Image (cartoon, helix red, strand yellow):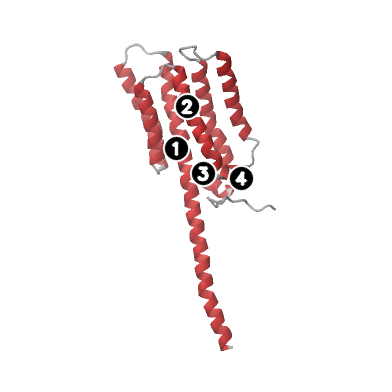
């Protein structure tokens, strides 16, 4: 039977993370990325301008979809390292932002809402608050948009699910980082407890030997 592997920076096993997150880390990362991949692909397929050749966009979308499919073939232990999933988060952030820019049907206020939502999801530690932000923010934005705008472009109706997907994505990775840090602190406390017990037992043993 193989021993569970740990990571040097965050000494926890995939089984420990699975218990805290509710599912295996590999499965959860792949699943949380699919909505991001789908919504970015849609934004890139239906752009308002044709500055970038469609053939290039189609190739990029296929490569982006393939990047998530490729994660299925990687080992579970690789997902334990922040050095592995940090680049994934950075890549998806760049693609999300570029998708909005290339789509061309987004105003400045939506960019502000987008970046503010990322900050909020990374700031709050309580999952209930993050879930509330994920649900309330798209609804409030949509109500304000309907109240202020006259005729709406069809792409506007994609904005609430976009905000919802963004909040789930960053809320998940913020939770993952916090769980790993918690497990690391718990492991350090156990190690300190063992060392303290060893330091306490050694003098007792030596004293007993001297008496004998």
What distance separates the C-alpha of mark 2 from that of mark 1? Answer: 15 Å
Look at the numbered disc 4 and give the secondary structure of its residue.
helix
Q: Are marks 4 and 2 in contact (CB under 8 Å)?
A: no
Whether the residues at callouts 3 and 1 have beta carbons within 8 Å, the answer is: no
Secondary element under disc 2, as helix, strand or loop, is helix
Residue 139 percent coordinates (x, y): 36, 26
Q: Residue 106: x and y, percent?
A: 40, 19
In the rendered image of this protein, does residue 197 appear above or below residue 191?
Answer: below
Camera-near label (2 vs 1) is: 2
Reading the image, the residue beneath label 2 is: 96
Read off the residue under disc 3: 21
Label 2 environment density (alpha carbons within 10 Å; few <14, some 14–19, many ≥20): many
- State the residue at coordinates (37%, 24%): 110
- Residue that label 4 marks: 77
Alpha carbon distance from label 2 to label 3: 25 Å
Mark 3 residue element: helix
Q: Going 64% across and 41% down the picture, which residue do you hit? A: 75
Determine the CA span between mark 1 and mark 4.
22 Å
Q: Disc 1 marks which residue? A: 171
Q: Marks 3/4: CA distance?
A: 15 Å
For marks 3 and 1, the one nearer the N-term is 3
Residue at x-position 47% and y-position 31%: 93
Of callouts 4 and 2, which one flags the residue occurring earlier in the amino acid sequence? Answer: 4
Q: Residue at x 47, y 24 (%)?
A: 98
Position of residue 78 measured from the top left corner of the image (x, y, whole percent): 60, 43
Q: Is residue 24 visible?
A: no
């Amino acid at each position: 039977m193989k021993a569970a592997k740990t990571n040097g920076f965050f000494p926890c096993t995939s089984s420990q993370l699975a218990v805290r997150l509710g599912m295996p880390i590999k499965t959860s990362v792949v699943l949380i990325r699919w909505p991001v991949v789908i919504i970015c692909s849609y934004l890139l397929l239906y752009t308002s301008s044709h500055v970038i050749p469609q053939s290039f966009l189609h190739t990029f979308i296929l490569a982006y979809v393939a990047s998530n499919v490729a994660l299925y073939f990687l080992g579970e232990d690789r997902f334990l390292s922040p050095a592995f999933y940090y680049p994934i988060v950075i890549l998806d952030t760049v693609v999300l932002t570029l998708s909005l820019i290339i789509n061309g049907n987004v105003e400045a206020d939506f960019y502000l809402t987008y970046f503010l939502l990322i900050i909020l999801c990374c700031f709050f530690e309580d999952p209930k608050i993050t879930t509330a932000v994920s649900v309330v923010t798209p609804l409030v934005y949509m109500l304000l948009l309907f109240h202020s705008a006259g005729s709406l472009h069809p792409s506007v109706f994609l904005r609430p699910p976009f905000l919802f997907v963004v909040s789930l994505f960053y809320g998940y990775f913020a939770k993952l980082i916090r769980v790993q840090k918690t497990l690391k602190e718990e492991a350090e406390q156990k190690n300190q407890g063992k060392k303290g017990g060893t330091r306490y037992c050694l003098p007792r043993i030596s004293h007993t030997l001297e008496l004998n």
